[in-house]
Structures are given as C-alpha cells and as structure tokens.
Amino acid sequence: MALQDLVSQTVAGLGYQLVELERSAGGTLRVTIDFEWQPGEERSVNVEDCERVTRQLQYTLEVEEVEYKRLEVSSPGIDRPLRGERDFERFAGEVVDITLKAPMGAAAAGQVAASRRKFRGTLEKGEAGWQLVWSDEPEAKPGQKVSKKKEPPPLQVLGFTLDELKEARLAPIVDFKGRSKRAGVQEQGK
C-alpha cells in the first residue's frame, strides 16, 4: 500500500482528514491533519488530537515496516493549504493567496502585469467556478485618516477553476487587537 493511502486511511479511521503529507530527505515524515468539515461547524485540532494520531501512526508505520527517522503531526495552521472543492466551499469569504500554473498573459487585458501568477483576495463562488476579489490600493495604516469623500478603490476580479491553480492557501492574517471574525465563529460552534 502506498504511504499516502496508508496514512490517509489511518487518519480517517480516527475521525480526521489528511490535509498534507510530506517526506523530507532527512527522513522526517510530516503529517498535517484537520477535522472533516461539516457546514456550520468549526473545530480546531489541538495537541491531544496530534498526540492521538501520532501514537496510532507510529504503530501502523511499524507494522507496515515504513522507514522514517522522525514523525511530526500538526494542525494546518493559519496558512492552511486549500485542496479540492470542499476546502474552497469551507473557506469562501476568507482572504486567500493563490498561485496560478500559468501567468495571466494577454487575458489580463492590461489590468495586471501579464507575467503575474500570485494573487491575494477574498475567495467567492463565481458563475463558472471560483473568483478572487481584491483591490491593489494599499490599506490605510493604523491611525491614518481616510477622507470620506475619497472614492473607494476599484475592485478587481479574477475568475479561475481549480485546474488552473498551482497552489492555494489561507492568507496568514493575524489581528493582535482583538478576536477575528473566524475566532468568533469558532466560539459560537463550541
């Protein structure tokens, strides 16, 4: 059985989802887990969850005679990779970073650099797939006054399909002044 299948099956048997599996040249096996997503429910992986999966994987890998030097099991973190349609549904409305497989080229019609492949914006469901909405104007700095008469910056929209993506991740945005919108959702779900 392939290592990916073995780890995925073991993790799923414990009630988790395998987000990412990485094997380094130094023999470290990195396993990233999360809970299966149910609409309206947000749960976070904690240390006890990682310990539980680690113990089971150590046993399974020993039985299957998989060689590794070190096993690391962790949660996805604030820059969680997005894989598949279900992850995009789960994180619609969030700020994400995407990298396209190919640069925009002539399709950008001069709106963005033709060689641009990386974008950050709000993920939304589009008419023919997914879209990213952003503004290239920098945000106001804390304490900076913004005129109410000033027109809001124009929004740009990039439509894409999952096949066109090289990588997609949640944008690692941290708010040190208070609870973020996502933290409020997690508190309500408990």
Image (cartoon, helix red, strand yellow):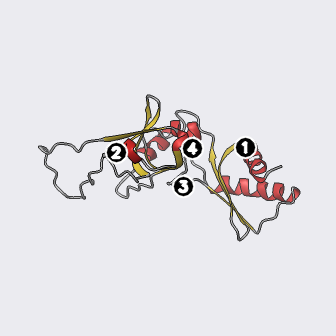
Is label 1 in contact with label 2 (beta carbons under 8 Å)?
A: no
Three-letter code, disc 4: Arg
Residue 190 appearing in the image: no
Q: Which mark, by number, is residue 43?
A: 4
Q: Which picture quadrant has residue 93?
A: top left
Pointer 2 residue: 134
Is label 2 in contact with label 4 (beta carbons under 8 Å)?
A: no
Pointer 3 residue: 77
Residue 7 appearing in the image: yes
Pointer 1 residue: 12
Q: Label 1, label 4: how many angstroms apart (C-alpha)?
A: 16 Å
Q: In the image, is 164 to the left or to the right of 104?
A: right
Q: Earlier in the sequence, mark 2 or mark 3?
A: 3
Three-letter code, disc 1: Ala
Q: Which picture quadrant has residue 153?
A: top left
**Number of residues whose C-alpha sits closer than 10 Å to that of mark 1, classed few (under 14), some (14–19) or many (20 or more):** some
Is label 1 in contact with label 3 (beta carbons under 8 Å)?
A: no
Q: Earlier in the sequence, mark 1 or mark 4?
A: 1
Q: Mark 2 or mark 4, which is nearer to you?
A: 2
Q: Mark 2 or mark 3, which is nearer to you?
A: 2
- Residue shown at 16%/51% (left/top)? 146
**Foreground residue among 46 and 108:** 108
Residue 118, given in percent of the width and then of the height, sits at 43, 53
Secondary structure of the residue carrying tag 2 is strand
